[in-house]
Each structure stands twice: as C-alpha cells, then as structure tokens.
Amino acid sequence: MGASEGGAGAGGVVRGGPGAREGDVPVDERSEVNQADAWERSYWSWEVLFAVAYVATALLVLFSSDRPTTAKIVAEAALAAIVAGYLAVGRRLVQSAHSGRAHIAAAVLIALMSTAMLATTTASFALFIACPLLFMLLELRPAAVATTLLILFEPVSGVLNGGWNGQLLSILLPMTAILITFSLLAGKFATDVLRESHARAELIRELESSQAEVARLSREAGTAAERERLAREIHDTLAQGFTSIITLTQAIESELDTDLSTVRKHLALAGRTARENLAEARAMVAALAPSDLATGSLPEAIRRQADRLAEELGIPVECAVDEGLPPLSTAVEVVLLRAAQEALSNVRKHSGAALVRVRLSAVDGAIRLRVEDNGRGFTPDADVFGFGLRGMRSRAEQVGGTLEVRTGANGGTELELEVPV
C-alpha cells in the first residue's frame, strides 16, 4: 500500500521551478520570472505534502510492531536525514539550475530511501517524498529509471523482512507493477506539460519579438512614406513656384531696359508667386490641405494655375471644367490639383508650346483631368526616372486612379489622369 501511494506522489510534483534543467526549451527572462512567480505561489502545496508525508511515515515506523527497535531507529534516521538534506540544500537545488549537484543529491536520496525501506517496509510511505523529488531534480529519463529502481526496493524489502510470504507477494508484486507504470506515465505527462509550457513561453517571446519588429518596420515605413509625401509636396508646390520666380526674374533682366510695363507685370507676378509659395509652406507646416483648395474650390484652383501659366508664358491656356461635378474627397482633390500643377510645370519647362488646353470632366463614375499642349511632344524614356512623373503616378495609385502620358495625335503632349469618385 505504501508503494502504491508513493507512486501517486511521483506524478504529483515534477521539476520545473525557476531552474529548468538542460534539455528544457529555453525561455526568455520575462517568461522565467513568470514561471518563478507561479512556482513560488504554488510551492507551499508541495511542502505541505512533504511535511505530512514525513510525519505520517515517521509515526507509522515508530509505532509499527513487526520490526525490531534497531531497524526502526535506522529507518527514522534515514528519513530524518532526507528531511535535513532537503532543508539544507535540496530546496535550493530544486529551485536552481545546478544539474551536477542535483544528480549527487538524487543519488544520496536514493541511498537514504533504500536504507529506510530495507530497514522496514513501512518506510515505503516516504515514496510520497522521494518520487516527486527525483522528478524535480532529474531529467525525465534519469528520473524514470531512478524512480523505478526505488519502487522495486519495496517488494525486495518485503521479502527480506517478511520472507517469501505468498499472500504478501501476491499483493505487493501486482501493486508494484501498477505503481511503476503509473509513476512513469504520470511523470512523463507532467514533464510533457511543463515542456509544452516552456515552448509556449518561447512562442510568446518570439511573437512579442515579431510584434516589436513589425512595429519598428511600420514606423520606418510610415517615416519613409511621410518623407516621400513631403518630397512630392515640395516638388509640386515650392519647387515649381521658385522655378516660376526664376523664369520671371530672367525675363525681367532681359526686358529691364526695353519694356518697363512688361517688367512691372512680371514683378507683380513674381511677388504673387512668392506669396503663394509662402502660403503653401505655411500650409505644409500646419499639415493643412493645399492653400489653393483652402481658399476655393478645385475648379477655381485649376483655373488659377492655368491663368498663371498664361501670364508667365504669354500664350493662350484654355481651361474648361464641366458643370455639376460630383463631390470629391480632399485626397482626390489634392491628387487632381497636384497633377495639374505638375503637368503645367512641365509645359513651362520643357514643351515650348504655343497653346495649352486643360479640361476637368466627369466620365463613367470617375473624374478625368486632361492637359494637352502643342509643343515638342513626349519622349517616353525622357522622364522615366523623373520625380515629377513618379510622384503623379504614386499619388494616382493612392486613390485608385490611373495616369497616362503620351504624345498627342497632332504632336505635343497629352496627360490624362482618371480617379474614381
């Protein structure tokens, strides 16, 4: 009976406190702290079992009448040595990772427990203490072997102390077999649960690490996207405004001694462009919509861009906007306005056109912006790496739109942008 109850104890407490042995799945520092907290919170239950099992076994040995006093003293001394060793060093070994010392402690435990059981079979009730300690001190396989050998000492003790009593052996042997089987299965189950717990802790650590990496990459991607957005904004507004001012300044230098009225007109236009650039800069700093949209509608903003180009180049710029355009989101309006600005800037810088047409219309659930000129035409490879064209395409894609730039049927360049409403 003592052996069978001792076997139940073998599966009840398994190693796995803060100090996991070699072969356990490694866990991160935080997981180890959590496991330590859990172990410390529940460790009292093991020590209650330890105390109850020791006291009960010591009393049973003391009051047993089938063994001489000398045998009882030997058994009591061995059991007391187990308790003293546990209190002195065993508790620290269970809660630390000193695997070499743990093996020595396990060997001493087996020796003392064997001595107690050989002195009196009643001492086998202390298997409640010994079997769990072996599983706490050793890895699964060594613990299973040690537990099996220790449990076998009970029938050996029964034979040595009581002789070949057929009735006793008919009970001890089957119970010993059941006990060994149960102890090994319970020990393996508990150890597998512990290993799975460690694996989950490792998975959580990897998951947290992955989440941190995703957050870092997301921040970097957001930073890169914001830089690209600001680069597009600067290119589409400030850079184009400064280009216009430079163009006007050059015109003023060439006309300063010949046409003062034209110089005054160009100076006024340069001043207005500088003020608009300043407004754009302030709008970007304040993270507002483009200043052209803040002071009027999209059609009005596009007309102002066309009128400015006409004043700067002195060429006709026709601007047509369909009546009754559907309401547009700010994001779509920004894309259309920036595309118009970039297209007209390219006309100013590259086309040499004598006529420009701008049309904003609603077609088949989309808004279409078309800018065409009769200048030099579009060379497909010329702006492949140009930031302006890339920026327009990127903006169009962000709102689900498409951009096409091609040479017109009668020469010149055609830019067509369609964005869904």
Image (cartoon, helix red, strand yellow):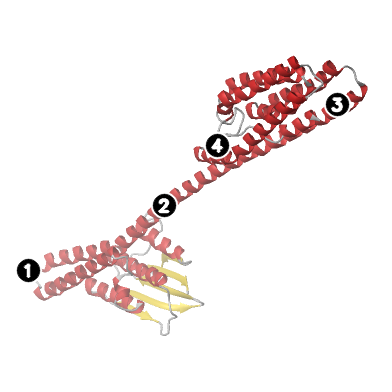
Q: Which badge, 3 or 4, comes first in the chain's sequence?
A: 4
- Work out how far the residue at label 3 is from the one at label 1, CA to CA, in angstroms: 125 Å
Where residue 408 sits, quadrant-wise, is bottom left
Image position, residue 340 (x, y; %): 35, 70
Query: Mark 4 near mark 2, Cβ–Cβ under 8 Å?
Result: no
How far from the left and from the top, in percent, is residue 294? 31, 74
Res. 198 visible in picture: no
Residue placed under numbered mark 4 in the picture: 27
The quadrant in which residue 264 appears is bottom left
Between discs 3 and 1, the one toward the N terminus: 3
What residue occupies the far left of the structure in this picture? 257
| Residue annotated with mark 1 | 257
Q: Tell me which residue sits at (26%, 63%) in the image.
A: 238
Whether residue 19 is visible to the viewer of this picture, yes or no, is yes
| Residue at 83%, 20% in the rendered image | 158
Looking at numbered disc 1 in the image, what kind of residue is underneath it?
Answer: Asp
Q: Name the residue under label 2.
A: 219
**Where does the N terminus fall, quadrant-wise?**
top right
**Residue, disc 3:** 172
Q: Residues within 10 Å of mark 1 (few under 14, many from 20)?
A: few
Say few, some or many: other residues with alpha carbon within 10 Å of mark 3 (under 14 / 14 to 19 / 20 or more).
many
